[in-house]
Image (cartoon, helix red, strand yellow):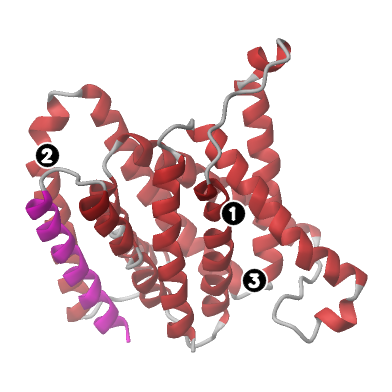
Amino acid sequence: MWTVLAFISALCLGCYDICKKIALRRNAVVDVLTISVCVSACILCVPLLLSRVAPETMADTPFFVPSLDLQAHLYTLLKSVIVLSSWIFAYISLKHLPISVVSPVQATRPMWTLLGALFLFHEHLNNWQWTGVIIAIGTVFVFSFRNKNQIKNNKVDAVYYVCLALAVLIGACSGLYDKYLMRRYDHNAVQVYYTFYQALMMIVVWLVMHRKELSQRLLPLIYWTPAVFLISVFLVVSDNVYMLALRDPDSLIAVVSTIRRGGTVLGFAYGLIWLKEKDPLHKILCMIGICAGLLCLAIGSI
């Protein structure tokens, strides 16, 4: 069952990436991120309020949100900081780089999660897993070398590639931390409260960055599209089923992460087919190489 949940999370995550790219076309990163986390918080307010008003009724449903103690709230707050940091870098890179470039690199996140498990939790890699890591790393290296001249000639793009790398590495840390949290706390409670903490932090950031406009009684211009709101819907569903999958005692973080990041194929296809982004053949080969590496990881982790 946990593998089915992982595939559902992957599908929603792919749609989430596409909606982010659409929403960021004419809007600032901070505006889109603030709106999306606030809408997510509003969505999650419903099960939280119902769980407090009618706990006996909600306890028999998969949407019940139990209370957390102080220690759990502190752990959840740390998760909010980690995830929000990864998102900020990811949004910046996605706004300024082609989605057909961002998607393959983001797809390598399970590889870094697995390497983190190797060093932090002293897990051991089998032959399939080592093959997957080598293929994925080699593909990313070739992809980076292919774009080296473009990056060298454009220092601005180099900054965005650094943001993309940071987003992937911090996201891998988040995956390892998720494994720790899901074995100790309820997945609904963690999702609800870490989303609330994110919303509060982003509101503060938004107010600070727009203090000049607000002091002049002017609201920042935001181009509203359905994608702005769909970001939250797809993210809430994707995170919920992902955390539910990790709660299964038989689930493997390497397999769940691999399947989940497979959703980036949707964003990759969107960039090449719909946006007509450049150099399609090279990017397709890159994506095939990364998918082959991730497939090896999944086979070796089953």
Asked if one can make out residue 68 in the rendered structure from this viewpoint, the answer is: no
Q: Residue furthest top?
A: 216
Q: Nearer the viewer, residue 162 or 35?
A: 35
Determine crowd level at label 2: few under 14, some 14-19, many 20+ residues with C-alpha closer than 10 A: few
Could you tell whether 12 is left or right of 111 in the image? right
Determine crowd level at label 1: few under 14, some 14-19, many 20+ residues with C-alpha closer than 10 A: many
- The mark found on residue 79 in the picture is 1
* Secondary structure of the residue carrying numbered label 1: helix
Q: Relative to 158, does residue 189 appear above or below in the rendering?
A: below
Q: Which residue is mark 3?
A: 187
Give the distance between the C-alpha atoms of the residues marked 1 and 2, in whole angstroms.
33 Å
**Residue 234 placed where, x, y %?**
52, 61
- Magenta residues, dominant SS class: helix
Residue range corresponding to the magenta coloring: 280-302
Q: Relative to 262, does residue 105 appear above or below in the rendering?
A: above
Q: Could you tell me if the residues under marks 1 and 2 are in contact, i.e. CB atoms within 8 Å?
A: no
First reached walking from the N terminus: tag 2 or tag 3: 2
Determine crowd level at label 3: few under 14, some 14-19, many 20+ residues with C-alpha closer than 10 A: many
Q: Residue 88 colored magenta?
A: no
Could you tell whether 136 is left or right of 174 in the image? left
Q: Residue 284 colored magenta?
A: yes
Asked if one can make out residue 61 in the rendered structure from this viewpoint, the answer is: yes
Badge 2 amino acid:
Asn
Q: Nearer the viewer, residue 189 or 23?
A: 23
* Secondary structure of the residue carrying numbered label 2: loop
* Secondary structure of the residue carrying numbered label 3: helix
Which residue shows up at 53% across the image and 49% down it? Answer: 226
Q: Which residue is mark 2?
A: 147
Q: Mark 1, mark 2: which one is toward the viewer?
A: 2
Quarter of the picture holding the C terminus: bottom left
Badge 1 amino acid:
Lys
Badge 3 amino acid:
His
